[in-house]
Amino acid sequence: MLTVLFIVMGVLILALGVVMMIGNRRINESGVRSFRRHIDALSPEARREVHDRVRAQRDKKEGR
């Protein structure tokens, strides 16, 4: 009887671990998608400032 109890407990612990691992798995979003999501949450004024900064950085890299 004690052996059956240990087997059942082991199976339950294993099942709980699998459920936790599956539930904890997050879909990795790309940096661009994350950036756009954060930008969309900003007000239009703040968004304009960020776009200007990004544009300035891009222009520096492109040599404009």
Image (spheres, rainbow, N blue to C red):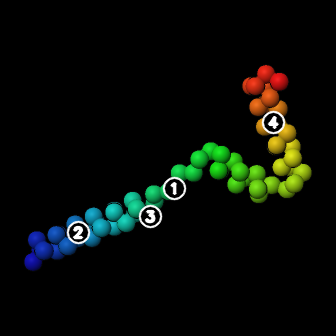
62 left or right of 32?
A: right
The mark closer to the camera, 2 or 1, is: 1
Judging by the rendered image, the residue that carries numbered circle 3 is 23
Q: Quadrant of the C terminus?
A: top right
Judging by the rendered image, the residue that carries numbered circle 4 is 55
Q: In the rendering, which numbered label is found on residue 41?
A: none
Q: CA distance from mark 4 to mark 1?
A: 29 Å
The mark closer to the camera, 3 or 1, is: 1
- Report x, y in % for residue 28: 53, 51
Q: In the rendering, which numbered label is found on residue 27?
A: 1
Judging by the rendered image, the residue that carries numbered circle 2 is 11
**Residue type indicated by callout 3:** Gly
**Residue type indicated by callout 4:** Arg
Q: CA distance from mark 3 to mark 1?
A: 11 Å
The structure residue drawn at horizontal position 79% and vertical position 25%, both measured from the top left corner, is: 60
Which is nearer the N-term, disc 2 or disc 4? 2
The structure residue drawn at horizontal position 20% and vertical position 73%, both measured from the top left corner, is: 8
The structure residue drawn at horizontal position 34% and vertical position 67%, both measured from the top left corner, is: 16
Q: Quadrant of residue 1?
A: bottom left
